[in-house]
Amino acid sequence: MINNRGLLTGILGKKHRDPISNTSFLLRITICTFIGMYILAMLIWGGGFLNPQQFLDLFNNNAFLIVIACGLTVVMIAGGIDISGGGVTALVTMVCIVYLDDHSGSVIGSLCIALGIGITFGLVQGILISYLDIQPFIITLAGMFFAKGMITIVSAVPRTAAQEAFVTLKQFRFEIPGIGYYGKTGNFIPAKIELGVIVAIAVVLVVAVILKWTRFGRNLYAVGGNKQSALMLGINVRRTKFYSYLLAGLLSGIAGYLYLLHTGAGDAANATAAEIQAIASAIIGGTLLTGGVGSVLGTLFGVLILKTMTSIVVTSGLREPYWQSITTGLMLCFFILLQSVVLALREKGSLKLSLPEWIKFRRKKSGTDSTP
Amino acid sequence: MAKGLNKFARSQLVVPLFALFLLVVFNLIRDIEFFSISIITNNDGNTVLSGNIISIINGASELAILAIGMTLVTASSRGQDISVGAVAAIAGSIFVSVLRGNQITIPIILIAFLASCFVAVMFGVFNGTLVAAFKVQPMIATLIMLSAGRSIAYWINGGATPTVSSPLLVNIGGFIPGIPIPTPIIIMILFGVLIWLLLRFTNLGLYTQVVGINEKSARLNGINAALIKLLSFMILGVCVAISGCINVCRIGLINHETLLLDIEMDAILAVAIGGNSLGGGKFNLSGSVIGAFIIQALTVTLYAMKIPSTAVKAYKAIVIIAIVVISSPIVKEYALQLRNKLFKKPAKIMENCENNGELTI
């Protein structure tokens, strides 16, 4: 009965919930780490961290990475890996610029090209991996090589976009009302976000919905968790895997366009090591490479943690570039060990990792409670 | 004889050997002189062998050494070490910093090599502990060193790219006076023989396969699976140190950013092209070495065709995809069915018989 439960439970109006699972425990750790890290940075270094624009720049600068990491998360949940994301992103930027400038193409056309390249990569890699049973690492590695090699075949020199319609689109900013900072002359400058951020957030939401509430999304978790039993349940394992790579390819195409919108330059060095950063973000966000566990929300926070760490390292005076990668390594080490410990405990089944009773806002269920 | 041939046709070495053969034939058609070996006198006055084939084997020696270690890691831990390039940069930095602090003599080179070996093995132990004790996936465990490794090398070098020059180092990276074969090839062969002896006369090879195929049953049979995994990572550490030192001797300086760049990808490819499963278990070292030669031969061929170095990757990717598609089990099965249909009439009759049998039932 409801009156047996605590007041807060009544307010929340929720039915009885199971204790949080260990995997959502990982997600909560990630989110709490990010919030704690940012608040700490604001308290200690203040300055730039108190500026809302700097927080929004986290999104502005990394919209493409968020999108790549989302695609990678989908593939990783299904038990595969896709390291072609960075290469495809760079290829898309170059091809779109050459199309826009040399062939006087339209913005819509370039967008179609970007999506087309992404889908083509996803299609070919998906078919080879899921229907021919070739190891995903090798195929997507070859995909990355192919994309990076093609960039210089398309154009040997770095390019910058000059087409007018595209440049207007690139310079388009949303102003967020009410949030902003005071410039040196004392005038109020409203905080701005780029078009790409909205796309990236939309991608995160759409992928989250797909993973949570569609049959395809649930199939992904089943396939990644245990391929054999997924097959026994009548899930088309091959098709599910194929669609996961297709989705990842499409998202890489979108990411390429976002990168172009952000920088407006086509260069073979674009999005270097983006695949490694995407993998790191997904891992920090609680996705397991073994498959079956993960969420895009975690990945989003993974990207934010990774990038906040970088700016903290720079702000705290360790300006030498090597400190960034060393701290990234240390942070990865921490999260990997944490995951491993959580998994080991879960496998044992002896220890339930859940929040202590007093945090839970819910009185312990009494014996007389009878659920309808 | 026919039986042996049949057995060979089923072996995992067929596709890589065939690919190597195709590369050779392609090069011979393109340029009949491609594989000619000549004896010339180099700048130091040594009589040495020269030619594309020598430069292919010479250039592939670091990759082949790494591929041997990578095969063992893949077989035992069912995953790959993607930090080899970064750790090689660290090992090379240690090698150079020891050499620069002393007068370069043969014992000092040995000490420097041992020091870099020790450091690389320690990083191997770090990766191996994460994999064996904490049960982290190898690719993720080594991601840590991949992102931090080259920065650690930068830190050891103090941000510079120090050079070392000594006739002794030139001997190691190039030719020893009086011996016409490049020294890296000799080192590679010596190392290969050493590993072969190790696997031939100890149980390590067998245990590695057993752990890779089924870790649980290996443990039930009294094999310390964690130790075997750790050992394979330590052996890879030695491989990394050797190839890092060879590369430093070859170019005479340590550049933490470009030393053996992307070699981890090539090493994993060599393992896969050699017909080894990246999912662990059974392995064949000669396959991986052949894979390394294929990759290097492909690169040299593409350079010889005047393809710009940045575009080489695209062509390489196409060839690699072709090789893995041909050697994938599903395509192989399909090809076998096709062959039976085309050449073996009896098989068809058998099939008919079976169908008839089904009908009568």
Image (spheres, rainbow, N blue to C red):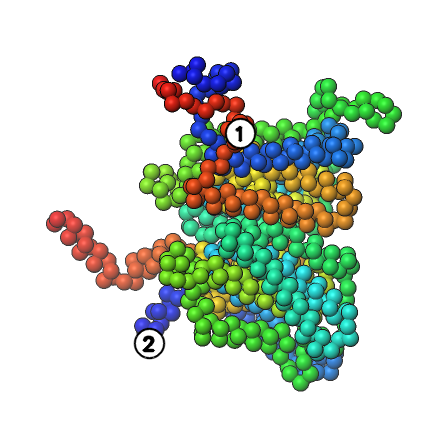
Q: Can residue A96 be seen in this view?
A: no
Q: Which chain carries label 2?
A: B
Please tell me in which quadrant of the rendered image residue B248 appears.
bottom right
Residue B17, position in %: x, y? 47, 67
Which element carries disc 2, helix, strand or loop? loop
Distance of label 2 from label 1 (alpha carbons): 62 Å
Residue at image location 51% in from the left, 54% down from the top: B133
Residue at image location 78% in from the left, 25% down from the top: A181
Residue B62, position in %: x, y? 60, 67
Residue A357, position in %: x, y? 50, 28
Q: Which amino acid, mark 2?
A: Met
Q: Give the answer, above or below, for where B184 lies relative to A229.
A: below
Please give the residue where the numbered disc 2 appears in the rendered image.
Answer: B1
Please give the residue where the numbered disc 1 appears in the rendered image.
Answer: A206
Residue A53, position in %: x, y? 74, 29
Q: In this view, does B6 lie to the left or right of B41?
A: left
For label 2, count other residues whose C-alpha is less than 10 Å away and answer few (under 14), some (14-19) or many (20+).
few
Q: Give the answer, above or below, for where B210 lies relative to A358.
A: below
Farthest top residue? A3
